[in-house]
Image: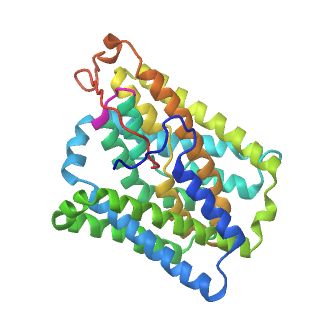
Amino acid sequence: MKRPSWPTWMPIDPYILALLGTVGVAALLPARGVGADIASGASTAAVAFLFFLYGARLSTREALDGLKHWRLHVTVLACTFLVFPLLGLAAKGLVPYVLTPALYSGFLFLTLVPSTIQSSIAFTSMARGNVPAAICAGSFSSLAGIVITPLLAAALLGNSGGGFSADSVLKIVLQLLVPFLAGQFLRRWIGGFIARHKKVLGYVDRGSILLVVYTAFSEGMVHGIWHQVTPLRLGALLGVEAVLLAAMLALTWYGAKKMGFGRGDRVAIQFAGSKKSLAAGLPMASVLFGAQASLAVLPLMLFHQMQLMVCAVIAKRRSRDPEDFVTEPSPSSGGGSRTAVGTGTRSG
């Protein structure tokens, strides 16, 4: 029997509903006392396992081959770790009139996290863009983010990020970088197993993130930080994020054209350079923000759903581009990058 799938017309990713449900459970039944200690330990283990899987999945050979298209990848990395943070810093002028200091810290943090992998590939494929470039760009961004995101957070967020010290740096190394490197080292022996059980391990990925969300929001409830957020402030946050997303979508598309990239490469740059990874951002926030993690990840959760909805519409429209436009040669890659394989979107 064919397993029922999520309707393509439904605007909300089912995983977002699971995240919202987890937030609801944390609000009604937050972990306290011994339960909080157990949840915190399980969350720490889940984060380490999550980054171990990231390392085991990344093909070193594919990554090295992707370096041949270095102009595209440098462009995506610049959008992700330079342009996004600059726009985040510019939003400082909205405090405290539009955003509260706590919400601004979360907003700035979302501009620092790496790009997505799965959804960037899915949207690029749907729009008939350069899919191999999207795969490499997303992988490079995620790999660089393990190091760059914590460093940017330490430099730009300061004490608002829960206090950055030698101890917090050690936690980042032990929970994120060491498991990732271990996954890369063991890839030659476990890569085949991971490829055969990709679907099951995908559920492990998402389950781990749900555990991180539950732990973070439970701690937020216990500390009473949700009293700092009002519906009006949330509406203002959504408006600011809509402006941020629109600016990045326009900049990546028209900026790539000015730089001489062909249509297929521009599609990959737009979808990889304008998006932020919930899967990478949530575990990092749990390490960096501690008790403040629930408010810190709220802007990222909202932005993630917004980017999925908007990019789905854009990708569908790009898929209807005339054939001669789709196969337009790319000066940077030496030829057209047509891809007509459709695929569904996933949370990245």
Please tell me which residue is depicted at 22% across the width and 53% down the height of the picture. 60
Say whether residue 129 is magenta.
yes
Q: Is residue 208 visible?
A: yes
Whether residue 15 appears in magenta in the rendering, the answer is no
Left or right: where does residue 185 sit relative to residue 98? left
Q: Residue 120's spot in the image, x, y percent?
A: 41, 40
Q: Residue furthest bottom?
A: 34
In this picture, residue 266 sits left or right of residue 88: left
Q: Residue furthest left?
A: 188
Above or below, comparing residue 261 to residue 93 in the picture: above
Tell me how many marks there are.
0
**Residue located at (46% from left, 50% from top):** 114
Does 82 sit left or right of 320 as displayed? right
Image position, residue 339 (x, y; %): 29, 27
**Residue 96 in sight in this render:** no
In front: 134, or 170?
A: 134
Image color mode: rainbow
Place of residue 305 in the rendered image (x, y in percent of width and height, measured from the top left): 57, 45
* Residue 156 image offset from top left, x and y in percent: 60, 56
The range drawn in magenta is: 127-132
**Which of these two is toward me, 278 or 25?**
25
In the picture, residue 47 is in which quadrant?
bottom left
Q: Is residue 267 above or below residue 31?
A: above
Q: Is residue 170 left or right of residue 135?
A: right
Vertical comparison of 198 with 214: above or below: above
Reply above or below: 207 against 32.
above
Chief SS of the magenta region: loop
- The residue positioned 42% from the left and 59% from the top of the image is 146
